[in-house]
Image (tube, rainbow, N blue to C red):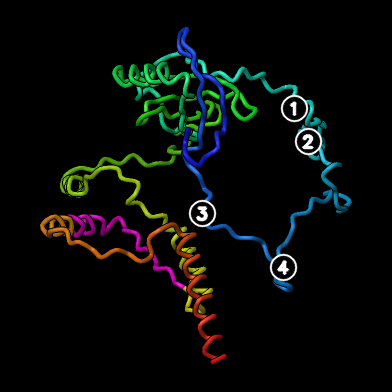
Amino acid sequence: MVSGQRAQWKGFIKFGEVTCGAALYTAASTSDRITFNTINKATGNRVNRVFVDSETEERVEKEAQTKGFEIENGQYIIIDPEEIAAAIPESNKTLEVEAFIPCSDVDDVYFDKPYYLTPDKMGADAFAALRDGMKKSNVAAIARTVLFRRMRSVLIRPHGKGLIVTTLNYDYEVRSSAKAFEEMPKLKIEGEMLDLAKHIISTKKGEFDPATFDDRYEAALADLVKAKIEGKALPTQKKVAVSKPNDLLDALRESAGMMMKAAADKPKRTAANANTGTARERAARGATAKSTAAKAATQRKAS
């Protein structure tokens, strides 16, 4: 069980003739992102969403709404929610492993959403046998089951003490890369330009550490909210200078020189940043500081 989280799905995982109870927990969440409400400029009140008829423009209450599939322009087949529910494949709550495959066999363009898979107390031994066997064999597992009212194919891989389940996009959902790159000109980079590019790459080699990646969009929103709360000037954005073909070689030379200088310099320890934490937390600290300052001012006036 994942502490403090509610299981998104509970069922069983089956490989061969071995079955054990298991549960899925969300591995990635957007709950810490800054969100905005739609506000009426005139009143400052929050705006509620209302559904209206596209022709009559009259309001349609929830109980009068249903689903429809468009067959022609403006012509729909009405499909009731009960009919949709009846068409959903019956779930036996079992993730049944269909095959074990090399971990590199699945292109990550098919990856959808990750979940942590944990065992129940009674099935811990069987679960651990599956996990460790997959680790030793360096394989992943393909399984299928009904998740969240939809038949899904999933990829199961060892992850720490447990397993991670990644729902997979279907083939029809993944667009062709050939179509995306069809207008890409045929270029062959060689000579000094290629050598400089390889040099820059070699000096920037590192390891994947998600903790070092900043969500700059969220940070920018936090700075904006904080500035608005404190009545300060709003942050401005710097323009990005794009390298032109005729000065690309000069840019590569300059980058290579900067990389060599950075490698020669010893890393310096930086002081702890007072603005660490999620963007939402930083914005909240700005609101708290504003509230504290207002209270102090009120107390001074009262004195």
- Rounded to the nearest angstrom, the CA distance separating label 1 from label 3 is 33 Å
- Rounded to the nearest angstrom, the CA distance separating label 3 from label 4 is 22 Å
Nearer to us in this view, 140 or 302: 302
N-terminal label among 2 and 1: 2
Please, what is the three-letter code of the amino acid marked with disc 4?
Asn
Residue for badge 4: 45
Few, some or many residues within 10 Å of mark 3 (<14, 14–19, 20+): some
Does the stretch in magenta take in 121? Answer: no
N-terminal label among 2 and 3: 3
Looking at the picture, does residue 166 appear above or below residue 55?
A: above
Residue 126 is drawn in which quadrant? top left
Question: Decide: marks 4, 2 in contact (CB < 8 A)?
Answer: no
Residue for badge 3: 33
Residue for badge 1: 84
- Which residue ends up furthest to the top in the rendered image? 17
Few, some or many residues within 10 Å of mark 1 (<14, 14–19, 20+): few
From which residue to which does the magenta span run? 235-257
Question: Decide: marks 3, 4 in contact (CB < 8 A)?
Answer: no
Q: Which mark is residue 67?
A: 2
Please, what is the three-letter code of the amino acid marked with disc 1?
Ile
Q: Position of residue 49 (x, y in %)?
A: 74, 55
N-terminal label among 4 and 2: 4
- Rounded to the nearest angstrom, the CA distance separating label 2 from label 1 is 9 Å
Which of the two marks, 4 or 2, is nearer to us in this view?
Answer: 4
Nearer to us in this view, 259 or 18: 18
Q: Tell me what residue is drawn at x 63 percent, y 26 percent.
A: 150
- Rounded to the nearest angstrom, the CA distance separating label 4 from label 1 is 37 Å
Q: Secondary structure at mark 1?
A: helix
Q: Position of residue 86 (x, y in %)?
A: 75, 22
Q: Tell me what residue is drawn at x 50 percent, y 24 percent.
A: 22
Residue 99 is drawn in which quadrant? top left
